[in-house]
Amino acid sequence: MMEFYLFGMTSVFYAIATGFALFYLYSRHERWSRWMLYFLGAGVCLHLPSFAFRLQEFWSVPANRYYVPINSFYGALSYLALVVALTFFVVEARHRLGILGAFVLPWACLASLSAVFRACHVGNTEIYQLTPALRSYWINIHPMMLMTAYAILGNAFGVGLAFLVQENQVKSRRPTELCYRLPAIADLEDLNYHLVVFAFPILVFGILVGGIWAYGAWGRFWGWDAKEIWALVTALVYGGYLVARAAAGWRGVKAVYISMLGFGCAVFTFVGVNFLSELHGYLSKKG
């Protein structure tokens, strides 16, 4: 119960931080950026002990001991929100681009609030005993790698949105003040690219580990489950983006649109396919 209270407060702080980020987008006052970071930091500081309490509760089920509790939709959303927030902190620390919070933090807010609503809907935070097939050390690697990649790619998507806004501002005959506050187009495109470059090998490694796990559990590396197919599609789209940018010299709007399409595939893989997948359905409690 303590875990859910802490996580509920975390979600509130993420929502407030997102609100301050949106205020900062349309205001030149730096105080909004500072308050955004204060509340985001407070959210992360509550999120970490919340995750620790969840781990303790998860391990109270003997069959779950020493495994990471992200086998449920609630747990996966919680972890996703945490990594989105932490990734934004790293980007902010390196580049001082607090204005991008308006484009990135809504994902942390959406993921955390969705987890809270999910828990309220089902009446618990989804602490289930792992099925025998899931009792493997691969559960500590495969889903965490994929969730980490999705969170970083969520940051890249937010940067892509900022790129499109700035590109439209630059082309406009009447650019607003926002044009002078957002980073340059080239800088936004490079940041989008570097985030994808960082996330892509994590995504591919996560998929490969899933195949190894499947081989050990069911005797086959690939089963053409809906989630497996769409994870592959996501990787192919991002791989195509990286190849097109490096080999064909694609730049600008065209390249950014491809990277954003990749994130659309990732979201569908994570959420939409749960209604179709027999083996990976968070919503059906199958892990």
Image (cartoon, rainbow, N blue to C red):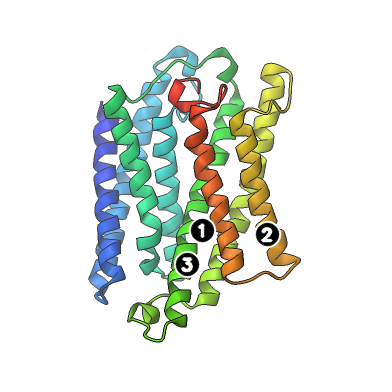
Name the amino acid, label 1: Ala
Residue 244 appears at what percent x and percent y? 71, 63
Residue 105 higher or lower than 247, as above or below: above
In front: label 2 or label 3: 2
Residue drawn at the location 25% of the way across and 66% of the way down? 23
Q: Nearer the viewer, residue 16 or 232?
A: 232
- Residue contact between numbered discs 1 and 2, judged by CB atoms under 8 Å: no
Instruction: Determine if residue 141 is in view.
Output: no
Residue 156: give its label.
1
Q: Where is residue 92, by image quadrant? A: bottom left
Q: CA distance from mark 2 to mark 3?
A: 23 Å
Quarter holding the N terminus? top left
Query: Which of marks 1 and 3 precedes in the sequence?
Result: 3
Name the amino acid, label 2: Leu
Q: CA distance from mark 1 to mark 2?
A: 13 Å
Residue drawn at the location 74% of the way across and 68% of the way down? 248
- Please name the residue that numbered disc 2 is placed on: 242
- Please name the residue that numbered disc 3 is placed on: 94
Query: Which of marks 2 and 1 precedes in the sequence?
Result: 1
Residue 279 higher or lower than 210, as above or below: above
